[in-house]
Amino acid sequence: MLELNAQVNLLLGGGIDSAALIPFYLSRGLSVRGIHFDYNQPSFEGERCAVIALAQHYNISITTIDLGLKIASTQGEYHCRNATLLLASASILPTKQGRFAIGIHAGTPYYDCSKAFLEDIQRIFDGYFAGSVQVEAPFVEFTKKDIFKYCKIAKVPIEITFSCERRSDKPCGECPSCLDRRALDENFGNL
């Protein structure tokens, strides 16, 4: 039986940032479990399809959590999203120990995608779990381009990921995530 520290719970949204976490941890010999959230985001169905496809590709289990609420957003930033998702994930732990990983990276202006956020959320978890629950973000210093390159090297099936904030059926082509994805595909698709 695996030790609890040999398993990591990945917050999976279906995009390349969270998809990169799967081979990162599997290559380190860890058991991986994905956690996907429904917070009434417009892109939920597209994300869900990508998460299921990634889970099948890597043969990992997925837990979906319906938060039963809509996280508000302003100009593309969801209010307190990463803190909400991490705390909700920790609340379903069967024991008071574990590891969580999130695919945040450098180059975004949002607090909950920063090193300061990671330090702050870890302090909160330490208060609840006395240091036995860890929050990790292995790509926090990577740019989006660095993650894309990592995905190419690690043979992540980028074509099954989903990167859109506004729609679920097909990418809108206009939101910041779609624009980032198109720029990566155009500039670095042949790496």
Image (cartoon, rainbow, N blue to C red):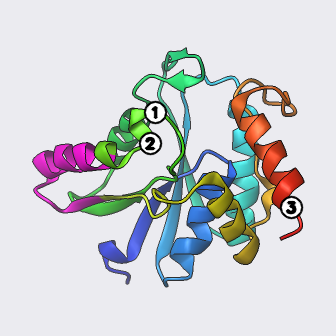
Point out the tag, 3 or 1, that comes first from the N-terminus. Answer: 1
- The x, y position of residue 145, in whole percent, is 68, 57
Find numbered disc 1 in the image and state the secondary structure of the residue it sits on.
loop
- Residue beneath label 2, please? 113
- The x, y position of residue 85, in whole percent, is 42, 38
- Residue beneath label 1, please? 110
Which amino acid, by three-letter code, is at mark 1? Tyr
- The x, y position of residue 180, in whole percent, is 74, 41
Crowding at label 3, few (<14), some or many (≥20) Cα neighbours within 10 Å? few
Q: Which range is magenta?
A: 118-134
Left-right relation of 120 to 176: left
Point out the tag, 3 or 2, that comes first from the N-terminus. Answer: 2
Crowding at label 2, few (<14), some or many (≥20) Cα neighbours within 10 Å? some
Residue at image position (76%, 51%) is 161
The residue lying toward the viewer, choosing from 61 and 32, is 32
* Mark 1–mark 2 CB contact (< 8 Å): yes
* Mark 3–mark 2 CB contact (< 8 Å): no
Left-right relation of 120 to 107: left
Quadrant of image for the C terminus? bottom right
Task: Please tell me the numbered disc located at residue 189.
Answer: 3
